[in-house]
Amino acid sequence: MIGRAQCSGVALQVNGKASDAHVQSEASTFRSMVSLSPGPNIVVATCTGSNGSIHASAPVQWNERLRPGPHAAISVTTRGTIVVLNGSHSRPGPPDHAPIVQYAWHRFERAPAALTLASGRPLTGSVAGPRLELRAPARDGEYDVSLTVRDVDGRRSTSSTVFAVRGGMPVAVDPVHSRPPWLGSAVIYAPVPQLWGNGGPRSVERHLPYLHRLGVNVLWLWPPAERRALGEDYRITDYFSLDPSWGPPQAFRAMVARAHALGMHVLIDFVPNHTSTQDPYYLDQKRYGTASHYYDFYDRNAHGQITQYSQIFGTTGLPNLNYGDPEVRRMIVQASLHWIRDYGIDGFRVDAAWGVQRRRPTFWAHWRTVLKQADPDTLLLAEASATTAAIFHGFDLAYDWTNHPGQWAWTSVFDFPKESGALLTPAITNAPQGYAPDARIMRFLNNNDTNPRFVDQYGQALTRVAATLQFTLPGVPEVFAGDEIGASYDPYSNLTPISWRDRSHLLPLYRRLIWLKRHLPTLRSQRVDVLKVNADSAFAYLRPAFDGGPPVLVILNFGKQDPHVVITRTAAVSSAVGAGTMRDLLTNRSIHLSLSGGSMSEAMPAHSMLVLVPGTA
């Protein structure tokens, strides 16, 4: 810190106690390096006047949210059938750079097979030392290993890495440019604890067996877990603290641990684009103006006014963070690591990721690098359009939006059921531009921003067809709390518990669709061939065979009429359907398609769907 004094003997106090920080004075200017502790740090400078009186400065406050400590890091190489994990790149952390004195390696319980040290001893518990050598497991797959380092002051840091075994040989994996291996079969579910009672994480934990039976394997916890302004969902006041609605911390951790035990991955809703106007940083800059240390924390226009997220969506009191400021960037990176390391979460659904992308296009790639080095299995979901190729420099997955933030790609498709099929092709393929080769899309019917709910707007019959579309297209389907039972509520209302009754008789269908997405290899691929049909209310597509799974032919009718749907046969379709005998995976019935020349046909009742594979029931 730098200051001015018109008297001698400058000394500093931090939180009312004398600081041992050295103060360097030159003429009327003084400077000092002051170590900050987590939490508020109120610094006052004092000096002695010519008459012996003590003068004190106005207090300056820093709100320190970063915890000092080491940084664990791992590199992976292979030597024949041996995997070499090197943790010697781990480094002491600022401000004191206390030396690292302990290294401990651990295996992940969900690995495909047990791990064995190069010595032949099983890797159980922890193994000490900065370097670990493992034999390649006999079973192919991806294997995660973690390293925890401890410094001389007892502070710890944990990082993870991944290696693969292919054909019995170990292969180093680049975690930064890889997606979680389970993403292809992921089904996201967003539990809202208020709909199950007021127990916060305990409400969710009580219902984890239900979600496990439903078949979902990724949880997106909603609303955000970071501390928020009272009564608000997306107005953050502290990125490092758990919101009381999700507390206490031990209950939150217990919920995460129980989800992991059931094979589920846990995402939190993270809001790094903007803060609340009740954030201490915002209040400090409001009080002190340009003299505030946090003045540059907020994005400003040419007139020095803070820009607002609300300028896009019409709400108020959401000041944008300034990602041109290195402290802001470090704060968000360290906050993300905090949730991974201290709460065990497996990834983030990042609110308004498109906003940060516009203001600082390079940030997300840097953020991804740091997080993937800490845990390669982390899933990064952007609230941004999957049509934006650059968003995948930082994220694994993005929204099924148009290029306009917040606009669903399927907007208006279901408002005109007689034309739904014809409207879907450009919505699904992003024609004429198409999608980037590495684009991965989250498919949804509802989320936190949709109201009314899909089933309330379009009815049970059309919901069944739309859900089948959602789960059988390339991408990752997302089920928002209660979609599977046709629940009706406004996410931003004063939520209260609802009757968990399948009023729309959707639950059996959702269970079947989730099972197919999780277990049918073909539905994990990114290939889809949209087929030409004769009826505008109908839509058909082929999912080519993939990874040992059969080709899948999907035929949907969104309309209220019963058309005889005629589909033009391509070479791939002819190969898939053979003589026309297929099995419907939704009902396990045999279906006999009528083949004629270069086409095939099937009678499709109103609001019907077929998910067909070759063979008979």
Image (cartoon, grey):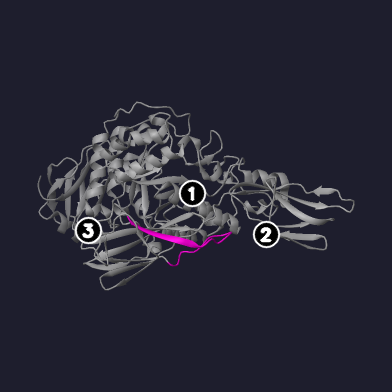
User: Would you say the residues marked 1 and 3 are in contact, meaning their CB atoms lie under 8 Å apart?
Assistant: no
Say which residue label 3 marks.
546
Q: Position of residue 62 (x, y in %)?
A: 65, 49
Query: Is 89 a magenta residue?
Result: yes
* Figure check: 374 above or below 499: below
- For the residue labelled by badge 1, is the local secondary structure a helix, a strand or a loop? loop
Q: Position of residue 160 (x, y in %)?
A: 38, 58
Say which residue label 2 marks.
33
Q: Is residue 193 visible?
A: yes
Q: Is residue 7 left or right of residue 87?
A: right
Say which residue label 1 marks.
405
Q: Quadrant of residue 497?
A: top left
- For the residue labelled by badge 2, is the local secondary structure a helix, a strand or a loop? loop
Residue depicted at x 82% and y 49% = 55
- For the residue labelled by badge 3, is the local secondary structure a helix, a strand or a loop? loop
Q: Considering only order in the chain, which callout, 3 or 1, is on the residue closer to the N terminus? A: 1
Residue depicted at x 37% and y 36% = 204
Q: Considering only order in the chain, which callout, 3 or 2, is on the residue closer to the N terminus? A: 2
Specify the segment rendered in magenta: 88-107
